[in-house]
Image (tube, grey):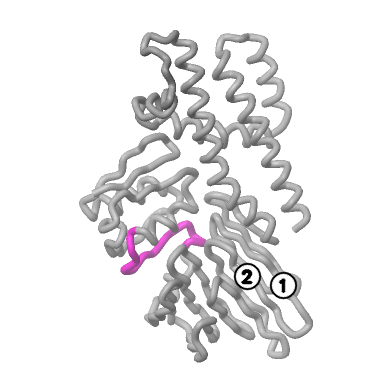
Amino acid sequence: MASATQDGHEGDAQRAEAFDWLMRIEAAPDDASLRAAFEEWLTASEARRLAYRSVERMWRVSAGLPTDYAEQLALAGSEKPPTAQPRRHRLRRIGWIATALAACLALVYLPALQLRLAADHLTSTAELRDVTLKDGSIVHLDAGSAIAVHYGAARRKVTLLAGRAFFEVVPGADRPFAVEAGTVTVTVTGTAFDVRSLADTVSVAVQSGTVQVALATHQKTIALAPGERLEVERAAGRMSKSEIASQDIATWRQRRLVVDGASLAEVVEELGRHYDGLIVIRDRALSARRITGVFDLRRPVEALQAMVGAQHGSVTQITPYLQVVSQ
């Protein structure tokens, strides 16, 4: 975790430097010497190019906001006459967008930094990764997912901090293997199963072996056998058990998302881990619609459009990195 901490601090510093370059270029777009210095800075490392790309992406999102809204905020409290010079108007607009962009960066990167500090292994957007633990057990991480590993003399424990993972556990009767996701704990000795952690629910699906699922607010545990799935509502603690075909478990490992009666909001959250941007659902009723189908995670935007279109909704692209879903 020390390396994750170091990488997180370095990434924040590079993004701050990239943001500074972006503001300087926006303020003086025709300055050839400034542009040359920027190109020299940018081409020095891949990390700088990635940092600038992420900051520029947020700039594009903010630039997609209504012009009159930006002007009203930029001019709030100002007695400047409407005939102000274009350069002053441009600088005021840059100042407003800089403030908005800083807030967006904080919203996006602060949770990500906290996750990096807590995680031993994590994946980025659209990245799948296999992690072999020291006992030989394998964790297959979905995109946008993170785990922390805690192995002791009496127990093996993995915390699913975000996203989704498929576990292939090496048997060990003398040292059980547990996966924690919020208030849900899955305990096994040796089996293969999928755990998904969403904003509102946690689900467990067993492919082989058996597992015991416990909830912190309940005294009893629930046993799951192969082909069984349990979904737990985080807020209410309600649990629902269902059957699932073995071949439909962890299909995300083949870049396919198999959905059977999930809410549109849940499917959008899953797609979001494979889309390098933000998906916003404006209609609450639409977000609760139930979805069934098979979607290609390699084409999340096309999957989103097909899914929403089947519900007679629409997807509006504000920028290549912002999709808005509405009725």
Q: Is residue 7 visible?
A: yes
x, y percent for residue 20: 64, 27
Toward the left, the furthest residue is: 312
130 magenta-colored:
no
Sequence order check, earlier mark of 1 and 2: 1
- Relative depth, front residue between 279 and 27: 27
Q: Residues within 10 Å of mark 1 (few under 14, many from 20)?
A: few
Please give the residue where the numbered disc 1 appears in the rendered image: 150
Please give the residue where the numbered disc 2 appears in the rendered image: 159
Residue extent of the magenta highlight:
252-264
Q: Is 206 left or right of 132, judged from the image as shown?
A: left
Look at 66% across and 20% down and name the residue there.
39
| Mark 2, secondary structure of its residue | strand
Disc 1 residue type (three-letter): His
- Relative depth, front residue between 223 and 199: 199
Look at 59% across and 64% down and name the residue there.
161
